[in-house]
Image (tube, rainbow, N blue to C red):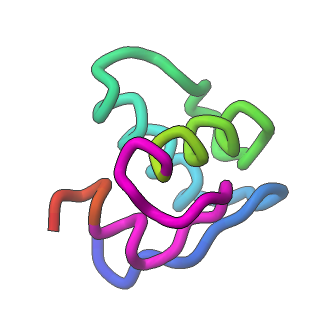
Amino acid sequence: MADEPELKAGASSEWVFYLQQMLNHHYQQTVVEENGWYDDATASAVALFRKQSGLDEGDHVDSEFWDVLLGR
């Protein structure tokens, strides 16, 4: 996928579903339900990934987040 959007808690879309799939793939286990809703569990998983990756703190998904998650 290209031109990934910024995402934050409360969002609901196919992009959130993709984000959840990629987080589960990254951790090689189910860390979030793949339901397309940017819920508290997704926000927590994003915050953990940001911290582990040395990104700024928070639970938002931006272009820098996508680049790290997708290995670019």
**20 horizontally vs 71: left or right:** right
Q: In the rendered view, tell whether residue 30 sits above or below residue 26.
A: above
The one of 16 and 48 positioned closer to us in this rendering: 48
Q: Is residue 28 above or below residue 58?
A: above
Q: Quadrant of residue 39?
A: top right
Q: Quadrant of the N terminus?
A: bottom left
Image quadrant occupied by the C terminus: bottom left
Name the residue located 52 percent from the left edge and 21 percent from the top edge: 31
Q: How many numbered markers are drawn?
A: 0
User: Residue 45 placed where, x, y %?
Assistant: 57, 36
The percent coordinates of residue 50 (x first, y second) are 48, 52
Judged from this view, the residue extending furthest toward the bottom is 3
Image coordinates of residue 10 in percent, x first then y, are 84, 57
Q: Residue at x 41, y 38 (%)?
A: 23
Q: Is residue 28 left or right of residue 39?
A: left
Residue shown at the point (58%, 76%) measured from the top left: 6
Q: Is residue 1 left or right of residue 47?
A: left
Pick out the residue farthest to the right. 10
At x 36% / y 43%, what residue is drawn?
Answer: 22
Residue furthest top in the image? 29
- Nearer to the camera, 10 or 13: 10
Q: Quadrant of residue 36?
A: top right
Q: Is residue 33 above or below residue 26?
A: above
User: From which residue to which does the magenta span run?
Assistant: 51-67
Does the stretch in magenta take in 18?
no
